[in-house]
Amino acid sequence: MTAMKTRVDEQYEAILRQHMKVEPDLVFQDDTVLGDVGLDSLTAVDVMLSLEDTFGITFPDSMLTYEVFRHFASLRDAVQKLVDET
């Protein structure tokens, strides 16, 4: 695992926890459905903007989909892809 990958993982989860106000003992799994743990449309926008600011990325319209924001891993992987492209 690269240093950049670790950085994305740690900061990504911290951003989700900050905006979603999840229980501190919640353990995110790759298949955790974000909507089941508090991600709604308004929170998704806040999370997206925070991810963009933190990682210096911009989500293209093609990534603004339910599939990308559905699971913990799908959103994390999208962020990693955008970071890798910068």
Image: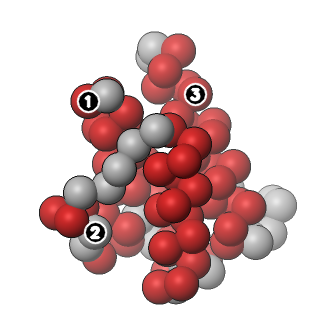
> Which residue reaches farthest top?
2
Q: Residue at x 39, y 56 (%)?
A: 75
Pointer 2 local density, CA inside 10 Å: few below 14, some 14–19, many at least 20: few
Query: Residue 66, can we see it?
Result: yes
For the C terminus, the image quarter is: top left
Percent x, y of residue 16: 62, 60
User: Which one is in front in this view, the residue at disc 2 or the one at disc 3?
Assistant: 2
Residue type, mark 3 in image: Arg
Quadrant of the image occupied by residue 46: bottom right
The numbered mark at residue 64 is: 2
What secondary structure is marked by label 1? helix
Q: Are marks 2 and 1 in contact (CB under 8 Å)?
A: no
Seen at 49% across and 74% down, the residue is 44
Would you name the residue on which mark 3 appears? Answer: 7
The three-letter amino acid code for the residue at tag 2 is Leu
Mark 2–mark 3 distance (CA, rounded to whole Å): 23 Å
Q: What kind of element bears circle 3? A: helix
Q: Which label sits in the foreground, 1 or 3?
A: 1
Residue pointed to by mark 1: 85
Gap between marks 2 and 1, in whole Å? 17 Å
Asked if residue 75 is positioned above or below residue 38 in the image, the reply reads: above
Label 1 neighbourhood size at 10 Å, few (<14), some (14-19), many (20+)?
few
Residue 26: x and y, percent?
72, 62
- Return the disc, 2 or 1, that comes first in the chain's sequence: 2
Which mark is on residue 56?
none
Picture residue at 49% right of the left edge, 73% below the top: 45
Left or right of 12, for residue 68 = left
Depth check, front residue: 61 or 24: 61
- Which image quadrant for residue 9? top right
